[in-house]
Image (tube, rainbow, N blue to C red):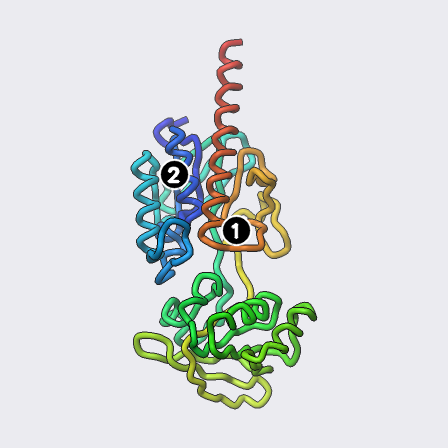
Amino acid sequence: MNMDNHYDAIVIGAGPAGLTAGIYLSRARMKTLIVSDGVAGGQMVLTHEIANYPGVESISGYQLSNIMKKQAKTFGCDIKTNVSLSSLNLQNELKHIILNDGSSFTSDAVILAPGGRPRTLGVNGEDEFRGKGISYCATCDGDFFTDKEIIVVGGGNSALEEAVSLTKYASRVTVVHQFDHFQAFEHAVEEARNNSRISFIMESTVASFYGTEKLESVDIKNLVTGKITKLKTDGVFIFIGYVPNTEFVRETIRLNQRGEIFVDSNMQTSAEGVFAAGDSTVKRFRQVTTAVGDGTIAALAASEYINSLKMKQKQIVRS
């Protein structure tokens, strides 16, 4: 075994969960490697302003990501970003990964923190105005639309519950849904319908986003008639589902039907020595703070696992 390429722990993913895990592991003097197919910070980098992170009045996602990355590296954590996995073996006691550049690494423990991504509409202007009027998180961004008129896209529980929640800020909320009925629980539908600030455009979808420096209007397409209507708006919140980035462990780790990783209270997965944290796990709330909490627990539990493994190996040598 090449000890230069052997780590106590490898963290897959460099979002807030992965970076937190790297900070805690490295500070506990665990030789740690973080690998990510994107930049450090994950989706957090796309957030223009984070105003609900405890102890920090306001900070951009990019700034917070850089601080976390710097902390991890200060404690000795190695970080490789913009690399993808070529192969992954989590079944043996010695974990093994190979990256797309051919480099190979082993470890005693692995923390899976690949995060996830909101399901997108995939229409013109969506990428351009993400974070500039388009949001996928009411808790994160609702306050920025105080006294503004906004649109919520979706018809499930999340969409209707968040639409109601957003009326605490917005002067008007228009729900746009592709069907003539909702997929939400009846109480969520009733609460939304009874809210005087919420109106509905059914059997329709947002077809395009327009603006200059920020979002200014959208095209609403009626899916029955095909008619397109332009609607001015200050913001659009999209709640049409969530996709965990877990395709690469589908054959080796127990997932639920949505592809989320099952974990116990110690963030332990179905595979021994493999832990998971953040948005890729089975959970209700997805926030930077919950990801940080998951990463902390996963790192502490992984540290205990690694130490017990080293103790066992010493006992074998002595005997």
Residue pictured at 63% horizontal, 77% vertical: 194
Q: Looking at the image, which is closer to me, 31 or 186?
A: 186
Please indicate, yes or no, whether residue 117 appears anywhere in the rendered image. Answer: yes
**Residue indicated by mark 1:** 280
State whether residue 62 is above or below residue 235: above
Residue pictured at 38% horizontal, 53% vertical: 38
Element at badge 1?
loop
**Residue indicated by mark 2:** 23
Q: Quadrant of residue 200?
A: bottom right
Residue pictured at 55% horizontal, 49% vertical: 281
Element at badge 2?
helix
Other residues around mark 2 within 10 Å, as few (<14) / some (14–19) / many (≥20) = many
Q: Is residue 187 left or right of residue 68?
A: right
State whether residue 85 is above or below residue 52: above
Q: Which mark is residue 225?
A: none
**Disc on the earlier residue, 2 or 1:** 2
Question: Amino acid type of disc 2?
Answer: Ile
Q: Is residue 198 left or right of residue 14?
A: right
Q: Looking at the image, which is closer to me, 236 or 127?
A: 236
Question: Amino acid type of disc 1?
Answer: Ser
Picture coordinates of residue 180 (x, y %)? 64, 81
Q: Quadrant of residue 183?
A: bottom right
Q: CA distance from mark 2 to mark 1?
A: 19 Å
Residue pictured at 51% horizontal, 24% vertical: 309
